[in-house]
Image (cartoon, grey):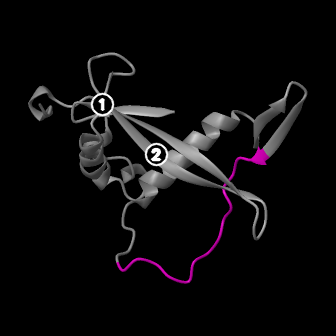
């Protein structure tokens, strides 16, 4: 998983893979973000309140734009595949399914109204997703 700290909480990025067989065999990946309270441990303290988790997704992730979601997805796929171009899923002790780690590329005839003005170096400069927050920024 990908993990970082923002606003006194630890966010953990992962994906859910859903198999589809029509119109061709493929996996759809859905991004997931889980939160825990930062207690200076790697995993933090779990949060059981669904409403609080919803508020955290809406507040901490609101600054993440398509480039950040896309970048996190590609980083996650690279972690799964390692040095290989494939992700291997064990089916049994001596059989595995190899899935291409690179997502399917396509062109869209539509776009957003606003142009993308950030270059690659500015992509991850959202202060809410970088490092540990200053003490005065921690939410209670």
Mark before the other along the chain sequence, 1 or 2: 2
- Rendered location of residue 61, percent (x, y): 32, 49
Residue 107 inside the magenta-drawn segment: yes
Horizontal side of 25 relative to 48 (left or right) equals right
Q: Nearer the viewer, residue 74 or 15?
A: 15
**Residue 112 image label:** none
The residue to which callout 2 is attached is 32
- Name the dominant secondary structure of the magenta segment: loop
Horizontal side of 63 relative to 12 (left or right) equals left
Do labels 1 and 2 touch, CB within 8 Å?
no
For the point 69% across and 33% down, the residue is: 82
What segment carries the magenta color? 99-113
- Rendered location of residue 42, percent (x, y): 39, 19
Horizontal side of 42 relative to 107 (left or right) equals left
Q: Nearer the viewer, residue 32 or 20?
A: 20
- Rendered location of residue 104, percent (x, y): 68, 61
Q: Nearer the viewer, residue 90 or 119?
A: 90
The residue to which callout 1 is attached is 47
Task: Give the class, few, some or many, for how many residues have Cα within 10 Å of label 2's Cα (few <14, many ≥20).
Answer: few
For the point 65% across and 70% down, the residue is: 106
């Amino acid at each position: 998983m990908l993990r970082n700290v923002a606003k006194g909480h630890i966010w953990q990025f992962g994906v859910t893979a859903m198999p589809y067989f029509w119109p061709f065999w493929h996996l759809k990946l859905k991004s997931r973000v889980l939160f825990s309270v930062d207690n200076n441990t790697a995993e933090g303290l779990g949060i059981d309140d669904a409403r609080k988790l919803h508020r955290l997704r809406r507040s901490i992730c609101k600054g993440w734009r398509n480039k950040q979601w896309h970048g996190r997805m590609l980083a996650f796929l690279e972690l799964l595949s390692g040095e290989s171009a494939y992700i291997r899923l064990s089916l049994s002790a001596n059989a595995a399914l190899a899935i291409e780690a690179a997502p399917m590329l396509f062109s869209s005839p539509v776009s957003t109204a606003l142009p993308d003005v950030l270059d690659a170096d500015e992509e991850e400069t959202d202060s809410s997703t970088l490092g540990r927050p200053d003490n005065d920024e921690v939410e209670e």
